[in-house]
Image (cartoon, rainbow, N blue to C red):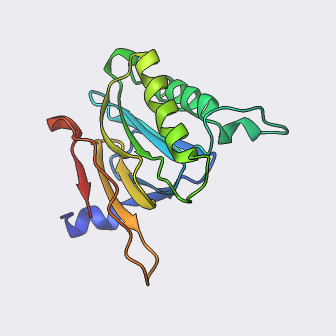
Amino acid sequence: MMSPEALATEKRIHVGQGEHHVTADPNVLLTTILGSCVAMCLRDPDTGVGGMNHFLLPEGAGAGTDAGRRYGAYAMELLINDVLKAGARRDRLEAKLFGGGRMFDSLRDVGQQNADFAERFLRDEGIPVIGGSLRGVGGRRLHYWPATGRALQRAVTDGHVPAPTPPRIEPVATGAVELF
């Protein structure tokens, strides 16, 4: 539970589809809502520099200004580079991945493809995934404090139909994910 003083100084920043945000401000809380999309929460625990992205599809060709932001390949590179520019060191980076839910019963499971892409990308980059929650059914609301690495998630449900809780990736001790 946060103290009244901490709540009074907390700055919420919503990260929408195709966006990312980087900060070292200990008062910043990054939020997003995910379905089949994936968000990477990335940080350097020594400096407290971190951020979040939110992508819609693994890869693709975009048309127009900033169209590439909706694709994971671009979004992941952008967040990593901006965290490094803000003072993080690559050898200390750690990530948490969220989202990739199956939203519809169709032949193409975009959430699965997004989750697979994100895991493969980080493995290829040598950045450890220390926690998160990928795949499952339905959406989730995510809160992430980059300075501490704390993450909270809650299943997004239709008020009339309870949604199953997305499966959790078992985190290591420093990468705990709290359900709220």
Which quadrant of the rendered structure holds the C terminus? bottom left
Q: Position of residue 144 (x, y in %)?
A: 36, 50
**Which quadrant of the figure contains the N terminus?**
bottom left
Q: Is residue 21 visible?
A: yes
Q: Residue 8, relative to residue 49: is it above or below?
A: below
Q: Position of residue 74 (x, y in %)?
A: 63, 30
Q: Is residue 22 visible?
A: no
Q: Quadrant of residue 73?
A: top right
Viewer-proximal residue, 180 or 106? 106
Outermost residue, left direction?
173
Which residue is located at x 32 percent, y 35 percent? 48
Tally of marks:
0
What x and y, as percent, mark residue 25? Answer: 38, 44
Residue at the spot 28% in from the left edge and 30% down from the top edge: 45
Residue 89 in percent (x, y) is at: 38, 18
Which residue occupies the extreme right position in the image? Answer: 64
Left or right of 126: which side holds 60?
right
Q: Quick one: 89 or 52, which is closer to the camera?
A: 52
- Vertical order, 128 against 96 (above or below): above
Left or right of 111 on screen, residue 42: left
Which residue is drawn at the image coordinates 46% and 60% (left, top)? 139
- Using the rendered view, name the quadrant where residue 72 is placed: top right
Q: Nearer the viewer, residue 140 or 105?
A: 105
Q: Residue lying at the far bottom in this picture: please name it.
A: 160
Residue 60, compared with residue 164, is above or below; it is above
Residue 170 in the image: above or below residue 104? above
